[in-house]
Image (cartoon, grey):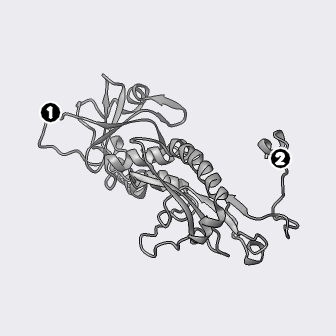
Amino acid sequence: MKFAQKNHLPVHRWPPDNVDERFDVGVVVSFGCLLHERLINKFPYGILNVHPSLLPRWRGPAPIFHTILHGDTVTGVTIMQIRPLRFDVGPILNQELHQVPVDCTAEELGAALATKGAHLLIDTLMTLSERIAHKREQEKTGATFAPKINASMSWMVWEEQTCDQIHRLYRAIGSRMHLRTVWMGRTIRLLEFVGKCHISLSDQNRKPVPGSVTYQKESNTLAVCCKDGWVGFKAVLLKKRLTAADFYNGYLHQSLQRKEPCQTVEGLFVSRKGGNAAHQMRENSAL
C-alpha cells in the first residue's frame, strides 16, 4: 500500500467493487482469501498466483517455512492459475527451480524467492497467451501441505528431535518465535542457537538422558542433549535474558558440581509433554 501510494499507483480495495471489462488478468501473492468463480471469470485470462514452492509440493500458507523445516535442498517458484474456492491446485503456467542454500533461514530464502517470483511473473505476463495455451495440470502424486506456523511448534521434544531437526526448526521459525523448553516447571526460551556441540564425558559408559544440560566454559555455551547428540545455546530467557554463564552461575551450578551433564530432575530441560510429570517428581521427592 505504502509503495503504491508513494509511486502514484492506483490502489483497489478488497473486495473489488467493479472489475467488469477493466482488466485482462488478476494477480495474487500471499493472498489468504478463497476466490469465487464469478470473480475469476471477470478476468479474460483468469487470476494468477505466485507461489514460493514447486507445486504440488508445499501447497498452503507456509511453504517457505516447511521447505526449511523438512530439509528440502531444492525449491522454486510457481506461477499458476487460480481455481475457484481451492488453494494452490490450479494449472501451472511457469515454474523455476531454486537451490536452497546450506544453513539459510526462512527469511533469507523468502527474500530470494520473492525476487525470483517477481521476475518469473513478468516473464509469464509478457508471454501470457502462449503460457496459457501450454499450461499443465499439477501432478496428482507428490502433493504436500504446508500449514501455518504456530507457537506449539516452538516446544522442544529432546527425546525425539535430532541435532539436524533442531537446527532446521531454528532456521525455519527462529526469527519469529523462540525455541522453548521447561525447566523446574517454568518455561525457558532458548536464544542464540549455535548448532551441534561435541561433548566429552569422563564416564563413557554413562549415557546422558535427553534434556541433560552442561555448561561449556570455554565457549560460554549451554549444551543440551537431544536424540542423537548435543546442541548449544548462548543465552536463555527466563525472567530476563541471561547469558549461558549467568544461567549456569545463578541456577545450574549446584546441579552441575560433579562436572557431568546433570541428570537430576532439577538439571533437566524437560520436553513440554513431560513437564507435568517432572514437576510431580520434584514434589514427591520433597515429601
Q: Which residue: 48% across, 42% down?
A: 105
- Seen from the viewer's position, the closer of residues 285 and 221 is 221
Alpha carbon distance from label 2 to label 1: 68 Å
- Quick one: label 2, few (<14), some, or many (20+) residues within 10 Å? few
Q: Is residue 176 left or right of residue 168?
A: right
* Residue 31 in picture, x, y percent from top left: 68, 60
Name, please, the residue furthest toward the right.
Answer: 17
Q: Position of residue 40 (x, y in %)?
A: 73, 72
Mark 1 crowd level (few <14, some 14–19, many ≥20, 10 Å Cα): few
Q: Secondary structure at mark 2?
A: loop
Say which of 68 and 130 sits in front: 130
Q: Where on the picture, by quarter, is residue 261?
A: top left
- Asked where in the image residue 50 lies, by quadrant, the reply is bottom right
Q: Please give the residue where the numbered disc 2 appears in the rendered image.
A: 9
Q: Residue furthest top?
A: 218
Say which amino acid is labelled 1. Ser
Horizontally, residue 97 falls left or right of residue 119, namely left
Which amino acid type is shown beneath numbered disc 2? Answer: Leu
Mark 2 or 1, nearer chain start: 2
* Residue 202 numbered tag: 1
> Does the rendering let one see residue 187?
no
Residue 244 is situated, as x and y percent measured from the top left of the image, at 41, 29
Query: 148 or 240, which is in the foreground?
Result: 148
Q: Residue at x 81, y 40 (%)?
A: 7
Tell whether 7 sits left or right of 62. right
Work out whether 3 lies above or below 240: below
Q: Residue at x 84, y 58 (%)?
A: 13
